[in-house]
Image: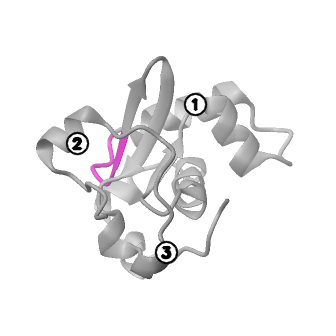
Amino acid sequence: MARKRMIDPTIWEDPSFNKLSLPARLLFIGMVSNADDEGYIRADAGSLRRLIFGFDDNIGKEDVAVLVVEMRSIASIHFYTVDGEDYAHFTKWSTYQKLQKDRIQSSLYPMCSKCVADDVQVPTQ
């Protein structure tokens, strides 16, 4: 279930964010809006297309797949695959999303082994 999220105004000044096309920026913000309390989200093109562009007939699953490839250049989001399923998480989630500790619901998605090894945005529980 999506929760209220904050979009930090400095995102509009971020050079890597501004290198993205407008549809990729919209996808990024849509993913922030729909990520779970630990910054994880299912990231296969079909799920993202349905979730973020559900009523837009002019954006297909293939278009979203191209946008995901484009977004892989941003350091603040990491895409990974576990057991053939695609996921993403925001590596600076806790910097930009302030959640009350007693209300955080644990992620149902698998953590990325690379990020755990690098100690990047490991959930605090």
Identify the residue shown where x is 48% and y is 63%.
37
Q: Quadrant of residue 58?
A: top right
Gap between marks 1 and 3, in whole Å?
23 Å
Rendered image: mark on residue 115: 2
Q: Position of residue 59 (x, y in %)?
A: 75, 37
Q: Quadrant of residue 112?
A: top left
Q: What predominant SS class does the magenta segment belong to?
A: loop
In the rendered structure, the answer to whether residue 40 lies left or right of residue 48 reads left
Gap between marks 2 and 3, in whole Å?
23 Å
Please state, as top left, top right, bottom left or bottom right, where the N terminus lies in the image: bottom right
34 and 13: which one is in front?
A: 34
Q: Nearer the viewer, mark 1 or mark 3?
A: 1
In the rendered structure, the answer to whether residue 117 lies left or right of residue 84 reads left
Rendered image: mark on residue 44: 1
Instruction: Tell me the crowding category of disc 3: few under 14, some 14 to 19, or many 20 or more residues within 10 angstroms, Cα based.
Output: few
Q: Is residue 108 above or below residue 60?
A: below
Q: Is residue 70 magenta?
A: no
Please state, as top left, top right, bottom left or bottom right, where the C terminus lies in the image: bottom left
Image: magenta residue range: 73-78
Q: Secondary structure at mark 2?
A: helix
Q: Amino acid at mark 3?
A: Ile
Gap between marks 1 and 2, in whole Å?
19 Å
> Is residue 57 in view from this perspective?
yes
Disc 1 and disc 3 in contact, CB within 8 angstroms: no
Q: Amino acid at mark 2?
A: Cys
Q: Secondary structure at mark 3?
A: loop
Q: Quadrant of residue 2?
A: bottom right
Disc 2 and disc 3 in contact, CB within 8 angstroms: no
Residue identified by numbered label 3: 7
Rendered image: mark on residue 116: none
Q: Amino acid at mark 1?
A: Asp
